[in-house]
């Protein structure tokens, strides 16, 4: 009487759960296609990568033992952790900024062109490099754009390469 029949082995609750999962899947897919979501995710991922890189390199940084000889071990550790934390945040912000700018510019270009190819990443890299180097003057902004575009092209070509079939 107006209800969809339930396939064998499923309950009405199972069907409702499947519908909800499909709905959530469509929502997630739509949100991942939006430039705002890509920008935020790239910014957050960039922040995380920058922080992790700094954490790894901080363990290898040179620490002058004579610099803090009057401090106890606990105070030295506290100071080092505080400095490392500040460096992680600073580096994370830089990486996050680069990731967010690149993702937003590349997404806008891809949306405008309605194509997904290497030209989007090259153009996105060029504009991102120019934006990041804009305070250095037009020549260096142009050079920064070219360098970032070349780097973006290299990364894109690496990610899009054909993997050999292993039969």
Image (spheres, rainbow, N blue to C red):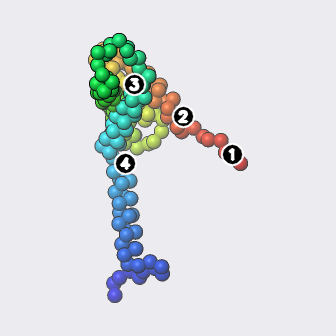
Which label's residue is closer to the chain start, 2 or 3? 3
Which of discs 4 and 1 lies nearer the camera? The answer is: 1
Q: Which residue is mark 2?
A: 158
Which residue position is annotated with label 4?
A: 33
Residue at coordinates 37% horizontally, 58% vertically from top-left? 26
Tell me if residue 139 can be seen: no
Looking at marks 4 and 1 on the same chain, the residue that comes earlier in the sequence is marked by 4
Q: Is residue 167 above or below residue 108?
A: below
Please state the horizontal and vertical placement of residue 15, each as a whole percent of the image. 39, 74
Within-10-Å neighbours for mark 3: few <14, some 14–19, many 20+: some
Q: Could you tell me which quadrant the N terminus lies in?
A: bottom left
Q: Nearer the viewer, mark 4 or mark 3?
A: 3
Write down the residue under mark 1: 166
Can you tell which mark lies on residue 97? none
Check the image and report above or below for 4 versus 90: below
Foreground: 51 or 142?
A: 51
Residue in the image at 33% along x and 39% along y = 44
Q: Are marks 4 and 1 in contact (CB under 8 Å)?
A: no
Question: Mark 3 sits on what residue?
Answer: 58
Expressed as whole percent of the image width and height from the top left, the position of residue 132 reads 33, 24
**Residues packed near mark 2 inside 10 Å, few (<14), some (14 to 19) or many (20 plus):** few
Secondary structure of the residue carrying tag 4 is: loop
Q: Earlier in the sequence, mark 3 or mark 1?
A: 3
Q: Tell me if residue 150 can be seen.
A: yes
Toward the viewer: 6 or 2?
A: 6
Query: Quick one: SS at disc 1?
Result: loop
Mark nearer the viewer, 3 or 1: 3
Q: Closer to the camera, 152 or 127?
A: 152
């Amino acid at each position: 009487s107006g209800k969809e029949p339930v396939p064998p082995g499923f309950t009405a609750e199972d069907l409702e759960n499947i519908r909800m999962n499909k709905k959530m899947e469509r929502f997630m897919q739509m949100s991942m296609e939006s430039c705002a979501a890509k920008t935020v995710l790239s910014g957050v991922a960039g922040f995380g990568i920058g922080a992790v890189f700094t954490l790894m390199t901080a363990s290898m940084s040179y620490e002058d033992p004579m610099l803090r000889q009057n401090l106890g071990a606990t105070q030295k550790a506290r100071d080092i952790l505080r400095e490392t934390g500040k460096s992680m945040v600073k580096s994370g912000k830089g990486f996050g900024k680069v990731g967010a700018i690149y993702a937003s510019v590349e997404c806008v270009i891809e949306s405008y062109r309605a194509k997904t190819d290497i030209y989007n990443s090259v153009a996105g890299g060029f504009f991102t490099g120019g934006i990041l180097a804009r305070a250095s003057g037009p020549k260096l902004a142009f050079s920064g754009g070219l360098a970032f575009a070349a780097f973006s092209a290299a990364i894109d070509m690496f990610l899009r390469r054909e993997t050999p079939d292993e039969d």
